[in-house]
Amino acid sequence: MDNTRLRWTVFFVLAAAFNFSMGGPIFFAPAWSYSVAYVGPPDPAAIRFWGDFGYAVLLIGLGYAIIALDVDRNRGIVWLGIVAKLFDMIVLPLRWLEGLAHPLVVIPAAIDGAFCLGFVWFLLRRRPLK
């Protein structure tokens, strides 16, 4: 395995690990993780939707793990990752600015921003096999 491929493999393993570390608590402990992220008592429906969101975060993490297995394929998942990360980068800081979320939510939004930049860099620099 060449150095470039190894670096991208590690990058996507880290992206998967980050999504698993965020999505796991949201999916498996939605009430607790909601109270960590958001201000005020949650509506029961909000807890259910929050848990569903955690499942989506886990699925996207699985996509990053799939990319890590072969960084020269599955580029469509990278585009999906960019869109997903952009959502968090925009929505989480807005929720905090609106007073709906704790400032803590800005940290994963910033990490998502760094991964998003990395995904764009990957698409620009790592050409698919022909």
Image (spheres, grey):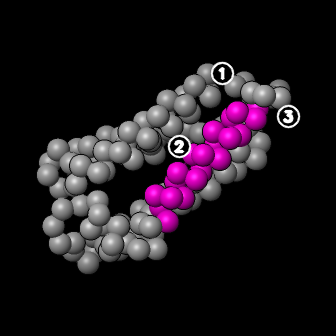
Quadrant holding the N terminus: top right
Q: Is residue 44 something one can see in this rendering?
A: yes
Q: Earlier in the sequence, mark 3 or mark 2?
A: 3
Asked where in the image residue 59 lies, by quadrant, the reply is: bottom right
Which residue is under mark 1? 125
Figure label count: 3
Q: Earlier in the sequence, mark 3 or mark 1?
A: 3
Could you tell whether 85 is left or right of 13 in the image?
Answer: left
Image vertical order of residue 102 relative to residue 88, above or below: below
Give the residue type that dot 3 points to. Met
Determine the secondary structure under disc 3: loop
Which residue is under mark 2? 81
Determine crowd level at label 1: few under 14, some 14-19, many 20+ residues with C-alpha closer than 10 A.
few
For the residues marked 3 and 1, what is the alpha-carbon distance in whole angstroms?
A: 17 Å
Determine crowd level at label 3: few under 14, some 14-19, many 20+ residues with C-alpha closer than 10 A.
few
Residue 29, position as x, y percentages in the image:
41, 74
Determine the secondary structure under disc 1: helix
